[in-house]
Image (tube, grey):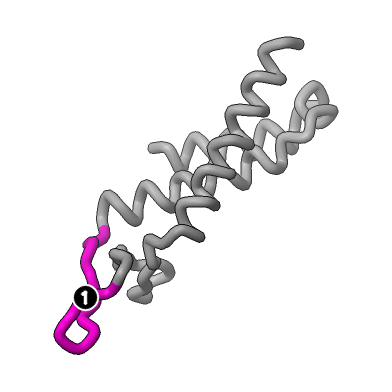
Amino acid sequence: TFGSKIKLFRSLYKTYSFLIDRDLSGLATNLKKVAEWRDRFAHGDIYFKAKGESLSNHPYVSYYHDSKQREQELDEKFFVETINVWRSYLSYTLCSSTH
């Protein structure tokens, strides 16, 4: 699974010196976020909340984390964070390919 690949990556990062010289901690953190987002969308429900006779402006995704039901509002803040995580990943990938 994607999660097990991230765990393997983190283990390699902590173990091998050729990776320690590179700042991969941000990459590992961002990969974990991507895996969490993927799980939320793959296994959660997307819905709008009722506000009186109308609906919320943004959709929500409900999901389980640590055996507790949670929800994430899919608003501008969420998508800005998502874009920034992907930009960070792409920036690392592009910088790595030039070495």
Tally the numbered discs.
1
Q: Which quarter of the rendering shows the N terminus?
A: top left
Image spot of residue 6 (x, y percent): 53, 38
- Residue at the top extreme? 98
Taking 63 as reference, is 85 left or right? right
Which residue is labeled 1 in the image?
A: 55
2, 58: nearer the viewer: 58
In the rendered view, tell whether residue 87 sits above or below residue 82. Answer: above
- Residue at the bottom extreme? 52
* Residue at (27% x, 49% y) in the render: 42
In the rendered view, tell whether residue 83 sits above or below residue 97. Answer: below
In the rendered view, tell whether residue 74 sits above or below residue 25. Answer: below
Image spot of residue 54 (x, y percent): 18, 79
Query: Tag 1, which secondary structure?
Result: strand
Taking 3 as reference, is 13 left or right? right
* Residue at (72% x, 35% y) in the render: 24
Q: Quadrant of residue 26?
A: top right
Kind of residue indicated by mark 1: Leu
Taking 37 as reference, is 29 left or right? right
* Residue at (57% x, 43% y) in the render: 85
Q: Which quarter of the rendering shows the C terminus?
A: top right
Image spot of residue 41 (x, y percent): 30, 52
* Residue at (74% x, 38% y) in the render: 14
Q: Residues within 10 Å of mark 1 (few under 14, many from 20)?
A: few
Question: Magenta stretch containing residue 67, yes or no?
Answer: no
Q: Which residues are magenta?
A: 44-56
Question: Magenta stretch containing residue 51, yes or no?
Answer: yes
54, 42: nearer the viewer: 54
In the rendered view, tell whether residue 55 sits above or below residue 7. Answer: below
